[in-house]
Amino acid sequence: MWHDAIGAALRRCDWFVLVLSPDAVNSMWVKRELLYSLQQDRFEGRIAPLMHRDSAYDELSWTLEQIQIIDFTQDFDAGFRELLRMWGLGYAPD
C-alpha cells in the first residue's frame, strides 16, 4: 500500500525535507511524517523545513519554531543557496 511505501522511503532517507504550505500544515499525513522524523535520532539536525508558501507552521508542530526554516517565498535563489549551505555543499554562481 502507498503508506507502506512512504514508510519505506522515510527509513531510507538521510534528511527529512518538509515543504511548508497551508495544505501541508493541514495534512494529517504530513504531520505523521514529521512526527516520525522527530522521533528518529538519525534525523537530529537533519530536518529541513522549506517555506514554499506562507503558512501557520506552528499548527503542524510547535517544534518547527526551534528548527531553521529556509524561506523560498521571497527569493528562490537565496533559499536554494541556504539549503545547499545547510547540506554542507558549496554554491558558486556563474
Image: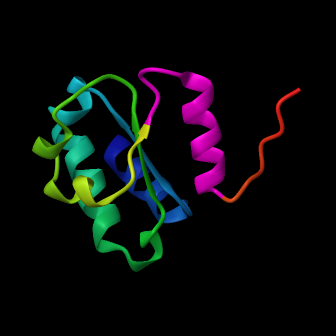
**Camera-side residue of 10 and 14:** 14
Q: Main secondary structure of the magenta part?
A: helix
Q: Residue at x 39, y 26 (%)?
A: 52
Q: Is residue 77 magenta?
A: yes
Q: Is residue 66 visible?
A: yes
Q: Residue at x 21, y 47 (%)?
A: 31
Residue 16: horizontal and vertical position, in percent? 45, 54
Residue 89 in the figure: left or right of residue 49: right
What stretch of residues is rendered in magenta? 71-87
**Camera-side residue of 24 and 57:** 57
Image quarter hosting the N terminus: top left
Q: Is residue 91 magenta?
A: no
Residue 45: horizontal and vertical position, in percent? 45, 68
Q: Residue furthest bottom?
A: 41
Residue 32 in the figure: left or right of residue 79: left
The relative height of residue 73 versus residue 93 in the rendered view (above or below) is above
Q: Residue at x 26, y 42 (%)?
A: 30
Residue 29 in the figure: left or right of residue 68: left
